[in-house]
Amino acid sequence: MLAFTVKNKKLVALNKPLPQLRPRWALVRVLLAGICNTDVEILRGYHAFRGVPGHEFVGEVADVKGVSTKEKSKWLGKRVAGEINVSCSAYNYRPVCAFCRRGLKTHCARRTVLGIVNHDGAFAEYLALPLENLHLIPNSIADEQAVFVEPLAAACEILAQLNMKQFREAAVLGDGKLAQLIARVLRTTLPRVVMYGKHKDKLQQASAAGIETQIVRGDASDLKRVKDNFALVVEATGSPSGLALAQHMTEPRGTLVLKSTFHGAAPVETWPLVVKEITLVGSRCGPFAKAIALLRSEKVDPPPLVARTFPISEAPAAIQYAQQPGVMKVLLKAE
């Protein structure tokens, strides 16, 4: 199969064998894959990953190993999205780790992570995942919607982590791909969501979805210019500089949710967390069922965020294009 691996901070094409399947694992033909900020950070050295990146995808099950004929027929030819954390149970490790025993498989001590940690990802014609990670995509959801299930689920994780009834409004810092999804998800439960970003065209996309917007400069001057305070602030700038502004905007006894992942350290003073008694919440992967339900209900409609679709063979050009200023979601399509 054709696949793309990370080498010298670039994507390099190679032909490699199809993934070998373990019992109760599926071979998935990738139909569409999304490029996100984490993939860009991987090229910069994030997690020192050197395999096939890519973790946002919709695909078609091409083969299943180690199941009955009846169960195999349930999956073959079906479209799926896949959770990216592969835990103890999928590898048949014994005993399973303490996190898996507590039901926290996304924090499995021995997990691999699709396209991020020791597991080849979706920038390829095929990938392999355990059946327990796969979610069937209803026929009413198009491929161009289904490819957003993974990042949309990450946005939905905020709803799972917090009691949203205690908030009336929220601020989302950042106007990129994940921030746009987060703002839309929060808007399904809160009467007011305000997005703070530095790109007018991106903010216009948020406005069209019923989200208030504010322009910022994205530098230290924002600490003096921005006077707004919120009980709930979500930091999704994808930049080390975002955390300082997020702390500044979180009111005393407020909640600050961190979503950004990037290579390197974020210079930040911690005293605002202490003085304002801010609750700091890290937030990562989320519930796929909730994301699929939002797509089915059309309460969230991500395809307008797609800037361009490239054939999989042009993945290096696609990831370069995705890094240009103002570009939103870029997809890779099967040929």
Image: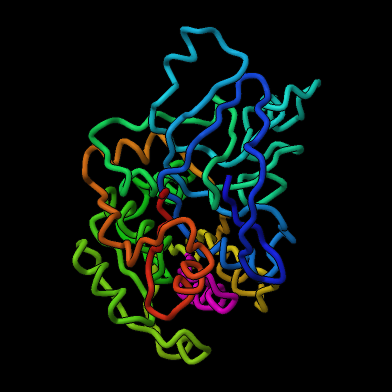
The residue that appears at 39% across and 27% down in the rendered structure is 78
The region drawn magenta spans 235-251
Q: Position of residue 307 (x, y in %)?
A: 33, 67
In the rendered image, the vertical position of residue 67 relative to residue 225, given as above or below = above
Q: Position of residue 48 (x, y in %)?
A: 74, 61
User: On the image, which quarter does residue 64 sit in?
Assistant: top right
Q: How is the image coloured?
A: rainbow
In the rendered image, the vertical position of residue 2 relative to residue 206, given as above or below = above
Nearer the observer, 117 or 4: 4
The residue that appears at 31% across and 79% down in the rendered structure is 214
Numbered-mark total? 0
Residue 237 included in the magenta stretch of the image: yes
Q: Position of residue 91 (x, y in %)?
A: 72, 27
Q: Is residue 195 left or right of residue 19?
A: left
In the rendered image, the vertical position of residue 306 relative to residue 275, given as above or below = above
Q: Position of residue 92 (x, y in %)?
A: 73, 22
One can see residue 257 in this view = yes
Nearer the observer, 61 or 133: 61
The residue that appears at 59% across and 51% down in the rendered structure is 3
One can see residue 163 in this view = no
Residue 20 included in the magenta stretch of the image: no
User: On the image, which quarter does residue 5 sit in?
Assistant: bottom right
Quadrant in which the N terminus appears: top right
Nearer the observer, 28 or 149: 28
Nearer the observer, 283 or 25: 25
